Amino acid sequence: MNFSDWIKNDIKNVLLVEPNFPIPNKSRNHSNFLPIGLLKIAAYLKSKNINVKLIRFEEQKNNDYGQTTFDIPIKDEFTPDLICVTSIFTYWAEHVKNAVLFYKNKFKGVPILVGGVYASLMPEHCKKYTGCTDVIQGPISEAENIIPDYSLVDVDYQIIHTSRGCIRKCGFCGTYIIEPDWVCKKSIKDEIIKKKLIFYDNNLLANQYIEDILKELIDLKKEKKISYLESQSGFDGRILRKKPYLAKMLKDAGFKNPKIAWDYGIVQAPKIKEQIDLLIDAGFTAKEISIFMIYNYEPNYEEMEEKRVKCAEWGVQITDCRYRPLNATFDNYSSYKRKQGPEDYYIHKECGWTDQKIRKFRRNIRRHNICMRHEVDYHSTILERKQVPQEEAKKYREMNYEEVKKYLPDAWSPSLYHDASEQDYFKVNKKNVKKVKKE
C-alpha cells in the first residue's frame, strides 16, 4: 500500500518513531542523522489536522543487557491510531526490529509502518524480520514538497533537496534503487526558512537547473538571508571538470567543506588533482576540501594507502567510508576492539582486506586528517594525549618530522606510505621519550 492509503478518516493520532540507533550522543542532532523523513510526514499529517508525536532517542534507553527497553511512557497519554518507524542503514536492522516489537506490544492492533533506507532496499526482509504491518518504499510523494516540521527537533539548520535520484549507478550505492526516478527542481528559494542549509542531493551538480539555483543562493547570501551551505554528498567531479565555472558559483553561494569522490584506483589521480585545483582556484583552501575514499572494497589496502599519500601531497582531508554491502543486516565493528572477524562485520576478503588492514587504514585516515587540518607534517599520540610536559611538547611541535622522530617513537608522517603490518603504538613512559637537548 502507499502511505496515503493508510491515512484514513479514523486516523486522528500518529506516532513517529526514530529507533535508538547506535549514534554517539554528540552526533544525535548532526545533519547526517536527522530523521528528515519523519519531519516531512509530521508536516504532511498536521496539514490534515492529524495529531503527531515524535519519539526520539532521548525517550529510549538500554537495559543491563544492552537491549532497548523504551520504558519511558509517552506523555499526555497519547494513543496512536498509526505508528511510523524510520530506518537508516540496513546493518542497523536490529534497532528497527526492537522499536517495532516494543510498540507492537504497547499498542496492540495498531498498524506499524516502516520506511527509510533499510525498508526501501530490503522491503521483504524488513517486513518479515521486524514484523511490521507494512513497508513504505522510497520518498513519500505526498510529503515530498512540504517543508519539514522543525518544531519537533532542536536544530539550527534545515535540509534541502534540489533533486531526487542520481544520474550514476555506482555498485556500492543504493540511490538508484531507493530513488529510481531522476527529478529536479527549478527553484528552492521559497523553501528556505533558516540561514543554514544542508543539501541532501545525491548529485547536486547534476541538476539541470543547478546554475539557476546557485544564482538564487548567491543573491540570498548577498541579502544576508542565508549564511552557511554544505552538501552532505560530494560534488560530482566529472561535472565540475566539464563546467569549471560551477566551482566559483559554489564558493560565491557560501558552500563550506566541499567534498569530491575518488572511488577507484590510483590511475585517477591526475583527474582528482584537477578537480581539487578547480576548487582551490575558486577560493576554497586545500585543508577544507575532503575526498570520499571508499575502502574495504575493490582497491586493496596497498593502493588505498598510495591514494592517501597523494591526498597528503595535495593537502586535503579524507572522509572515512568503510564499505558494507547493500544487503548487510548487521555490523558490529568496534574501534575499541583489537581484533574482529567476518562474523562481526563485513570484510572484503576477495580484494585482500583483513581486519588488521581495515583498522590500520582507519587510523591512517584519522592521523592524516589531524595533520591536514592543523597543517603539520606529523602526528604523535604521545603529544595528543599530553604524555610529556607542556614546555617539552612545545619544543617538539616546532620540529619537523625528520627532527622529531629522533625523540618521539610514535611520530607518524602522512606523506609516507605505511605498511599494514607497521607497529602503531608504543608503551609510553618517560623512558621512551628522549629529552630535547637544551641549546
Image (tube, rainbow, N blue to C red):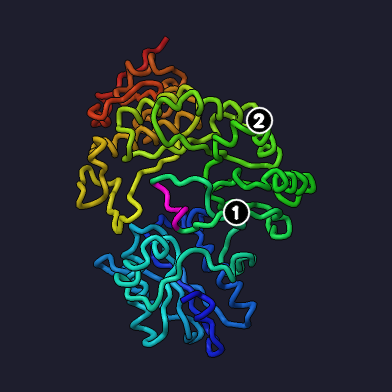
The secondary element bearing badge 2 is classed as: loop
**Can the viewer see residue 181?**
yes
Q: Within 10 Å of the Cα at label 1, are there few (<14), some (14-19), or many (20+) other Cα atoms?
A: many
Q: Which residue is mark 1?
A: 163
- Residues in magenta, as a range: 172-177
Marker disc for residue 200: none
Q: Which residue is mark 2?
A: 283
Farthest-out residue, top = 439
Q: Nearer the viewer, mark 1 or mark 2?
A: 1
Position of residue 290 measured from the top left corner of the image (x, y, whole percent)? 50, 36
Position of residue 395 measured from the top left corner of the image (x, y, whole percent)? 44, 20
| Residue in the foreground of this view, choosing between 369 and 313 | 313
Of the image marks 1 and 2, the number of the one nearer the N terminus: 1
Q: Who's the residue at 59% across and 46% down the image?
A: 204
| Residue in the foreground of this view, choosing between 114 and 436 | 114
The secondary element bearing badge 1 is classed as: strand
| Residue in the foreground of this view, choosing between 367 and 98 | 98
**Can the viewer see residue 59?**
no
Q: Could you tell me how far apart the alpha carbons at marks 1 and 2 are, in whole angstroms?
A: 26 Å
